[in-house]
Amino acid sequence: MKKLAFGLTVLIQLLSSTFAQEIKPLVPVDSQINQQLQAVLADPIVQAALQRIRERESLTVEEQLAITEIAAPPFQEKRRANDYLQRFLDFGLPDTYIDSEGNVVGYRRGSGDGPTLLLAAHLDTVFPESVDTTVELRDGRYYGPGIGDDTRGLAVLLSVIDVMNHYKIETIGDIIFSGNVGEEGRGDLRGVKALFRDLEGVDGFISVDGVRLSRITAGGTGSRRFEFIFSGPGGHSFGAFGLPSAIHAMGRAIAYIAELQTPQFPRTTFTVGTVTGGTSVNSIAADATFAIDMRSNNRRSLTIFEQQAKQAALTAVLEENSRWSSDAIGVEFKLIGDRPVGSTSVESPIVQVAAGAYAKLGVDIGGITTSSTDSNVPMALGIPAITISGGGDGGGAHSPAEWFKPVDSHLGPQAVLINILTLVGVSGVSNPVLANDF
């Protein structure tokens, strides 16, 4: 790690531009929101904090590299969580704990009577424990599994906490910082689900996830994931010939599902991702299972397709039983993933502040997007939520060749700080624009 840190400050200076010119925001920003945003940015203390973020970016990247090397496979985030808890404490969040789900939670209290904003970055990666997480520097890029998704987000939160405490910035609203578990794969957003189950009065949510500042995610693609489990008597392929087969029933079901039609708008997709079953080549299968992933940007479309897929499996069972004059084959539907559909209006202050912050920093983002992130959960609850990135350049997410390059990476934490302060308000400087509704 010392070798990686050597020369990091020089590298970041070479890759960082001077402050860019302000550009037109991606969406029109309400005049009252813009007034508060301008007040925040005009404050000398805030200006100093933004400059400190730029100056400490080499430290932010060092923290990112160190956290990357602490493996955090799905459902095995504890070691990274313990490390992150200590970093919260070191940067001045004494009211910090690990909750029953494994999330790291830290409070930064405001002066009172303001909204509560929750910011999170996820601790977990997609990689099993067997994957080497050592970071390597090659040709100006840092390579390491999970270095961008989402170790970058974790480091950004630390940078923001550090500068806010360094300059003793007093906000009106409360801020909750979290390193949450269970964002990836079969984690099924369990960490954020637990946060919104246990925390009261959260008025807004920002997930910091990934690297390139290319989008504001204000829509949540929902997903339902099932195992379709077929079972039957089984038997010898010759001696028990005439019994129905669980694998044959599964094959019929997959064939029917493959022919189902889905709407292009709202976008609805599906795939049978894995299949298992049987005992041997000369056995009539007593069991067979496939896993199916179904997604849509619309709750009703997702529900309709789920019903169609289940009906296809039931029809397949009937046909397999009928083929052999039997009733021995059955199917069970086991839910293994449930990410709710949701959205945040572009007229919401949380979207407009993000768009305005990027414009003030001269960051030309690509658009307002819909994706599957931790923000799905609060969106589905009607709580304003967005997902934004942590800054820098990167690629190869979810692969061992994932990489990060600190190109203007300071802009990520700068944007996050501007979002926080404008939403919850700064004492004596600005009023909160996030409503205190929940």
Image: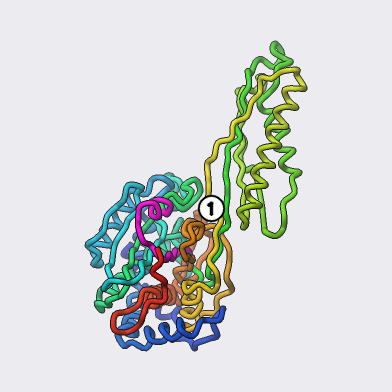
Where is residue 119? Give x, y as percent.
Answer: 39, 64
Residue identifier under label 1: 340
Is 45 situated left or right of 371 in this image?
left
Near-viewer residue (82 or 15): 82
Is 389 situated left or right of 111 in this image?
right
Location of residue 202 by image quarter: bottom left
Q: Is residue 257 magenta?
A: no
Near-viewer residue (184 or 151): 184
Q: Is residue 108 visible?
A: yes
Vertical comparison of 50 with 201: above or below = below
Is 246 situated left or right of 341 in this image?
right
Q: Is residue 201 magenta?
A: yes
Q: Is residue 11 visible?
A: no
Near-viewer residue (192 or 272): 192
Q: Residue at x 53, y 64 (%)?
A: 395
Direction front: furthest residue: 437
Vertical comparison of 206 with 423: above or below = above
Vertical comparison of 84 with 167: above or below = above
Where is residue 261? Give x, y as percent.
Answer: 75, 49
